[in-house]
Image (tube, rainbow, N blue to C red):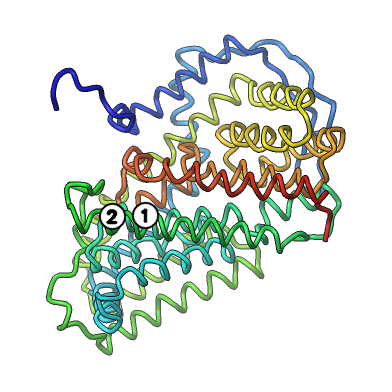
Amino acid sequence: MPENQPLKWYERIPHPVIMLFGIIVITAALSYILPAGAYEREVVDGRQRVVPGSYRLMASTPVGLLDLFRAIPAGFKTAVDIIFVVLASGIMFGVLERSRMVENTVGTIVKNLGLQRKYLIVVLMTFVYGFLGVAIGYENNIAMIPIAAVMSLALGGDLILAAGISVGAVTVGFGLSPINPYTVGTGHKIAEMPLFSGAPLRSVLCFLALSLLAYYNVRYFKKILTNQSKSLGQNLDTDGFVLSRPLETYRITSNNWLLLGIFTSGIAVMLYGIFNLGWYINEISAIFLMIAVLSGLAARMNGRLLSETVLRSIAVVAPGAFMVGYATSIKVVMEMGNISDTIAHNLTEMLTVLPTYASAVAMSLAQSVINFMIPSGSGQALATLPIMIPVGELLGLTRQTTILAFQIGDGVTNLINPTLGGLIAMLSMCRVPFDRWLRFIVPLIGWILLIAWAALLLSVYIEWGPV
């Protein structure tokens, strides 16, 4: 690059480790600038939620140098469940990959569908992963991410395309899902509205966003096929993801069918437990480990081979697991400084001076900012909607519109939220660094926000009710 040529925006993105540490330092500095404050909480149906109008200032609790670094191990302690599910998923996929089941299955599928349909496959896979996000959830899909990596490389794509197909689609589908129990469901309970009401408009918005993502993925795929130097996935580790022999030689063996049956049965048991028994991260990790052990036995791995596979798999996903705990440290610093509620309170106050249509868009932007501090969808709903719903009614917004503004602010920014453990975990499963992901996904976010804001303004215009 010539010396006088200015750097492009993405060339200024620091390494994720440096970027997250910078956010931690800035957050600690804000604890010296912003007043400490907190809302009162009340327990409703076993969960704490904010009491509207209860914000009070409190004694300042600035985060000192020792506390700043103490927040990092505290972040790992807070995120230990998600950290381990990353390790468990990596172990499971490592065993399945070593058995050649994933490679043979993907190779056979691509051979039968034909490379001439590669763009159609990308579109279909984007919608499949989007449906998984809509219907199943977020971290629940972590085990499915490496499959997209194998598929993308088999088609001639790269790991960035794999992340767009899988991580992007799961995030968009989950974030804008009309039946998301954590955001829409919690919001409707707080607003005392029919559960998952307003599904038609949300369904159209979710479908349009996934369609835009599918187009974006295909456009990127065509670009890198035309010019490999345009690939953002250069020099990323593809070991274990690349097909090892010519496409026409692939077939699914009887042992592959057995392993595929173990994997799909395990996922079915996991989903049953999630929807019927209240299972969450720890139970998901346990199922992944059980699948790994059974798959190792079915693949006739001896103890040494299985042990070496486990340790090698952990080494592959360890950087991603580290980043999950590291990112959670930001939330810990905000809690130490007691500034989360202060920021939420001031953002809410700013909305009261805006006209109705502008306030709807501004409310979604305010929720976007808050999402970086409270990455949990249900946690953000419980912390903000008891405040936002009355403010929205004062501004002329229906409760349904206020919940949609919250869903957009939470859901769309999940695509670039470094404090969201699930996002970092899934990116690690397809070995995509966060800075590369930002270069890929940031241009798309503006277009998704335009579609989402159009739906939000329409909801204001039609005075969207509970139907």
Q: Residues within 10 Å of mark 1 (few under 14, many from 20)?
A: many
Identify the image quadrant of the C terminus. bottom right
Is disc 1 in contact with disc 2, using a CB cutoff of under 8 Å? yes
Name which residue type carries label 2: Leu
Seen in the picture, residue 377 relative to 275 is either above or below; the reply is: above
Q: Name the residue that disc number 1 marks.
A: 163
The answer to whether 353 appears left or right of 18 in the picture is right
Seen in the picture, residue 60 relative to 268 is either above or below; the reply is: above
| Residue 63 percent across, percent down from the top left | 54, 15
The answer to whether 203 appears left or right of 156 in the picture is right
Seen in the picture, residue 156 relative to 18 is either above or below; the reply is: below
User: Which label number is shown at residue 159?
Assistant: 2
Residue at 45 percent across and 24 percent down: it is 23
Residue 334 falls in image quadrant: top right
User: Which label number is shown at residue 101?
Assistant: none
Seen in the picture, residue 439 relative to 422 is either above or below; the reply is: above
Q: Residues within 10 Å of mark 2 (few under 14, many from 20)?
A: many
Name which residue type carries label 1: Ala
**Along the line of sight, which residue is nearer the eye, 449 or 175?**
449
Identify the image quadrant of the N terminus. top left
Residue furthest to the bottom in view is 254
Question: Label 1, label 2: how many angstroms apart (C-alpha)?
Answer: 6 Å
